[in-house]
Image: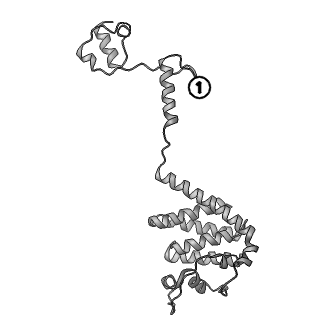
Amino acid sequence: MDCLEAEKSYALGILPVDFAVNPKRGIDEEEIFTTLALEVRPPARPITLDVYPQDGSEFIHQSRLQELYTMEPFFTARQINMYNYRMAAQDFEKRATRFQDDRILMIKKFPLKFDLPGKDAKEWCKVCLGSKLYNEIYDEPCSEEVEACLPSFSILCHLEQHMVRSLLKYAYRWFLAINMHDSIAKWVYSLLTCLERPVEKKCQKFLEIFKSAMRQRLRACDECEDKQLHMLLAILDLSFMD
């Protein structure tokens, strides 16, 4: 191999054959600092972790494959969040199924503590959200201070299906008025747990409208509300698909 060929080989990162055979051959100072690399040929057969490499190229291909298997998977923040929402939706599915199965027993175990407001949306707003949020939603102020009720079993298991659907519609109106406040999100989640499936077409259409409004709100909400909306959307997509 002449000097010109040697320079080309080193420039390509290929170890000259005569150097490999006779490592005592003198090389120039420039050659010492030239990057050397083994020429890696495309594999002539499928390379797996169980294959015994027959040459250096196959060994390198197998080493690269081993490195891929040992690398920790990388997920973006969005992918992690979407996975968490999916898991939350699956957890909801289990809770909803158990609620429907145990509702009769729960009615006896968790007796109703007060008379329900019927179909009075404003009274339900006071019950679910309290007077503070009520005054943000309705023009007519609430003259008394009312503390919001959490969506407890002592209320939920006593709701008939027509009332569950009505309360979801009330919650939708409250959402349009003050966005997805944490209190509204808790009630929507709980009411969806009570909603028997499959839902009728009219209710399904309403849920689609609700979903559309929530997706639109995602464009302008803060981080906390974003999580609430994504979780509810995941639940609706998983458990209430048309």
Question: Going 53% across and 87% down the picture, which residue do you hit?
Answer: 146
**In this view of the protein, which residue sits in the foreground, 200 or 79?**
79
The outermost residue toward the bottom is: 143
Residue 56 coordinates in the image, percent (x, y): 47, 18
Judging by the rendered image, the residue that carries numbered circle 1 is 50
Image position of 207 with respect to 109: above or below = above
Residue 47 coordinates in the image, percent (x, y): 56, 25
Residue 75 coordinates in the image, percent (x, y): 49, 47
* Position of the N terminus by quadrant: top left
Residue 115 visible? The answer is yes
Residue 61 coordinates in the image, percent (x, y): 50, 25
The outermost residue toward the front is: 109
Report helix, strand or loop for mark 1: loop
**In this view of the protein, which residue sits in the foreground, 42 or 127?**
127
Residue 200 visible? The answer is no
**In this view of the protein, which residue sits in the foreground, 172 or 131?**
131
Its colouring scheme is one colour
**In this view of the protein, which residue sits in the foreground, 77 or 66?**
66
Q: Quadrant of residue 120?
A: bottom right
Q: Amino acid at mark 1?
A: Asp
Image position of 141 with respect to 16: above or below = below
Question: Going 68% across and 66% down the picture, which residue do you hit?
Answer: 96
Question: Going 71% across and 65% down the picture, which residue do you hit?
Answer: 98
Q: Badge 1, how many Cα within 10 Å: few under 14, some, many 20+?
A: few
Image position of 78 with respect to 60: above or below = below
Q: Quadrant of residue 84?
A: bottom right
Image position of 54 with respect to 239: above or below = above
